Amino acid sequence: MLYKKNQTKELDMELFKHPTAEYRGTPFWSWNCVLEKDMLMRQIEYLKEMGFGGFHMHSRSGMATEYLSEEFMNLVKACRNKAEEEDMLAWLYDEDRWPSGSGGGYVTKNKAYRQKILMFSVDKVDFAEKEEGVREGKPYLLAVYDIVLDEKGYLKSYEQINEEEEATGCKWYAYVKTPPESGRYNGESYVDTLSKEAIQEFINITHEKYKESVGESFGTSVPAIFTDEPQFKPKDRLPFAESRKPVGLPWTTDFPETYMARYGEDVLKTLPEILWDLPADVVSQPRYRYHDHICERFVEAFVDQCGAWCEKNGIALTGHMMCEPTLSYQTEYIGEAMRAYRSFQIPGIDMLCDRIELTTAKQAQSVAHQDGREGVMSELYGVTNWDFDFRGHKFQGDWQAALGVTVRVPHLSWVSMKGSAKRDYPASINYQSPWYKEYSYVEDHYARLNTVLTRGKPVVKVGVIHPIESFWLYYGPANTSFETSNAMDEKFLEFTKWMLTGMVDFDFISESLLPEQCGEITTKLSVGKMQYETIVVPNCETLRKTTFDILKAFKEKGGRVLFVGECPKYIDALPSNEVQAFYQSCEHCENGQIDLLRALKQEQTAELVDAIGESVHNMLHAFREDGDIKWLFLAHCDKELKYIRHYKETAIPTDTPVREAFTIILNGTYIPKLFDTVAGTVRDLTYEVKNGKTYIECEIYQQDSLLIQLTEGAGSLLFKNRNI
């Protein structure tokens, strides 16, 4: 357990004022040069001075000490020892650079463990026999297809033919290819992340090596190991159906066998349906099943095995997947993000370029809630620029904290600026930056915030069926599928923002995880550790039969089911009239912000209104129960101030401090206290209780956030000290 101190009945005020290491950030510490022990020991002291509670020992471009060598492991041990001396934490990193899985190239010296790519091409290449192809990394043939498209580019017909047979349409070869060696992987290649054997070898080479070196500290001064951007071969889409451009898809050697075992079908018979759309708006169940099975193979091989090893050895698996924010990116690189989090002890995300990816954070937070995890990790600030200042650090950190991030991994603290390292970005979050002695101002704020937001339990009333599996149906050629799939992505992003900025907190529900998570069904739906009063089905085209049956049982018990947008047409990607009857028996609303928030008015945590009575939609929140009290955290999620609309002729620059006044309206009678996380103090707020509601007046700036303690009680405090 990382946050053992949050088990006390009440918040320890001394801990709030002076948080300990586990509540503090633990940056990527870029090992990017010839490593020297004295230099590393000195920099650990600098990191502590900056307010950090630990560090991730992160091999990065430029490192001239051999990865996983005796010298390297001795330095890891020395840093672990120094962390213990400084009351800090030493976090591990599982790869030489990234993405994780190749073990610095040691795993993929065995060519059978290298990534496999299913290639579709009109060009024939020299094919080896399968056994030789796997052993030597040579291409081997799977099947040959005669593809006939109609005048609109839809799949009119297809059939398997012999290699030498003439095609009536266009002849396409499906074969397995192994990528070439690359300096990225120290002269080897990326790993087959769908292969349990390959990933077991990765664990043997990497995790067991760390266990041998610092295993006695697992779960104490070495709390976790970070895995970085594991992925499969990104799924290509044809730019247009008639294109003859080669395309590649993820594959593994025994995929046909496990697909047959799962579905009772030969995947090779229907492979063309993965690439081309069927006519007459017919969706392809084989396409749906391919995406599902690829995702399951990936998660079983990589995440489940790494997570199980960590669980067995008393250390947490943390880190993040590749490309998490949109339905399109998830489908392309990992299949489904939420499924991948199921074996993380501390699920995590990556927030690059100062982006505001609400979906990314909410997906990880949802699984953390449902699995009862202690928090969420975020690698943040990466790929910003050298002028990314403290305001940016705080804005990014605040909105992510509101969506469950408790383990901050700032990107990046350099060991050295020598050579290519000086071109990394943002500017080094270490002693090289002139502001490094001031950085504890930022870290103290987040550490204090974490002492509160890791306590108690989240209050979330709404569960939302995640629409990723509906998206798979439309992952075809751009000219026949992109308009539909792009609209689905836009709806996904809009829905998430409307809900969260409308103060309706929710958890996504993964259809793949739901059967094992689902507990007792009453007027509340139990999903793991969470119970939801309302289930929302937003813009889904297909539902799993297991999901549909659970929704029906929930409604029969008196639960509330709300459909947003049109009725789903399919069950397990097959047409179904049964859904329409259920849809008609449930509540449903249009896919629009006003209709959605009106339908979920009773699920709002609070209302935020400005000085002229308009709703404020530029904040996120976290709401937690902690014994007899509640905690409300508010953070901005939009840099463009809503007040700009009141100054239509004079735009307000986003870097100009502007005071923002609003009122928080809560159902219930509370006595609020402001816990100032920057100063480490507590003070009263201006509030009034009337008609069973509590009104709290606030004035803040756009980089501010609010942590408010709510104790049940009556009364009002009407002095005008609103600048908080």
Image: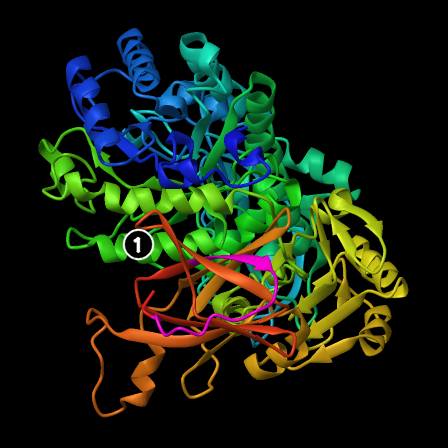
Q: Does residue 185 appear anywhere in the picture? A: yes
Give percent across and percent down for residue 367: 60, 46
The residue nearer to you, when weighing 508 against 568, is 508
Q: Is residue 634 left or right of residue 502?
A: left
The residue nearer to you, when weighing 644 against 201, is 644
* Identity of the residue drawn at 57% across and 37% down: 298
Give percent across and percent down for residue 56: 34, 29
Q: Is residue 340 magenta?
A: no
By secondary structure, the bulk of the magenta-drawn segment is best described as loop
Q: Is residue 711 magenta?
A: yes
Q: Is residue 434 left or right of residue 184?
A: left
Is 220 above or below relative to 643?
A: above
Label 1 SS: helix
Q: Where, by quadrant of the figure, is residue 602 drawn? A: bottom right
Q: Is residue 396 left or right of residue 631?
A: left
Is 524 above or below relative to 102?
A: below
Task: Give the magenta range.
Answer: 707-722
Q: Is residue 195 left or right of residue 441?
A: right
Give percent across and percent down for residue 67: 30, 18
Q: Please say which color scheme the image uses.
A: rainbow
* Residue found farthest to the bottom: 649
Q: Residues within 10 Å of mark 1 (few under 14, many from 20)?
A: some
* Identity of the residue drawn at 68% across and 61% down: 461
Is 386 above or below relative to 208?
A: below
Q: In which quadrant is the N terminus drawn? A: top right
Q: In which quadrant is the C terminus drawn? A: bottom left
Mark 1, residue position: 394
The residue nearer to you, when weighing 182 against 69, is 69
Q: Does residue 144 appear anywhere in the picture? A: no
* Identity of the residue drawn at 62% across and 67% down: 669
Give percent across and percent down for residue 507: 62, 56
| Amino acid type of the residue that numbered disc 1 sits on in the rendered structure | Lys
